[in-house]
Image (tube, rainbow, N blue to C red):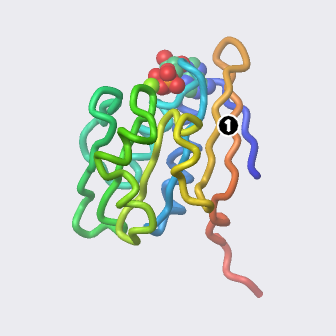
Amino acid sequence: MERHITSKPGETAKIAAALAKRMKGGEVLALIGNLGAGKTTFAQAFARTLGVRHRIQSPTFIFMHEHRLDRKSDPAYFVHADAYRGGVAELRSIGLAEYFGRPDAVVLVEWADRVKSMLPKKTITVRLKHLGGDRREVTIAGAPAAANRRPRG
Ligand code: ADP
Ligand code: MG
């Protein structure tokens, strides 16, 4: 488990970008935190680093967006879902579960605590907590190890 304290939106964005760089495809992320905790800030930086060229919108009303990534990029899709208004039944009916385990997609679910029962066991959990003012606690559990920057030996 990794724990960070951020004191401005750009710092939360940096953590999101660093996590996005560790994605290989097939990952599912659960983004959890109250209103104003920074979920959208996190999701936008995450998406941008994965290769989404436009600014992503919160999929609150349609529950899910599939973004095709740059052809050269690996993985090929970023799927952004939001369980704020849609529960398990709604997210299932629009096909969210069909992306789970697909090696060419990275899936991020906002308000994921509302649909925990449908998420895969190896879901990466990102919790954002408002600590007051501009301070946020970001905890990440279940993420793949950061790439080794230095050659060994
Ligand atoms: P959510 O999607 O969880 O409701 P948003 O990302 O939309 O949250 O909003 C978070 C708000 O808090 C934004 O206005 C952002 O600029 C502000 N903010 C202030 N400090 C931080 C921080 N450390 N990390 C993320 N957002 C922050
Ligand atoms: Mg939001």
Q: Which residue reaches farthest bottom?
A: 153
Q: Which residue reaches farthest top?
A: 133
Q: In the picture provided, is 72 more to the left or to the right than 109?
A: left
Viewer-closest of 42 and 86: 86
Measured along the vertical axis of the image, is residue 76 above or below residue 18?
below
Circle 1 sits on which residue? 138
The image quadrant of residue 102 is bottom left
How far across and how far down the image is residue 127, in percent?
65, 37
Viewer-closest of 46 and 111: 111
Q: Amino acid at mark 1?
A: Val
Q: In the picture provided, is 104 more to the left or to the right than 137?
A: left
The image quadrant of residue 143 is bottom right
The C terminus appears in which quarter of the rendering?
bottom right
Q: Residue at x 26, y 69 (%)?
A: 72
Viewer-closest of 5 and 25: 25
How far across and how far down the image is residue 93, in percent?
31, 46
Measured along the vertical axis of the image, is residue 9 above or below residue 17?
above
The image quadrant of residue 135 is top right
Q: Residue at x 37, y 48 (%)?
A: 92
Viewer-closest of 8 and 19: 19
Q: Residue at x 55, y 52 (%)?
A: 18
How far across and how far down the image is residue 52, in percent?
30, 49
* Mark 1 close to ligand 1, CB under 8 Å: yes
Number of marks drawn: 1
Q: Which residue reaches farthest front?
A: 89
Classed neighbour count for the residue bearing mark 1: other residues with Cα under 10 Å, few (<14), some (14–19), many (≥20): many
How far across and how far down the image is residue 32, in percent?
59, 35
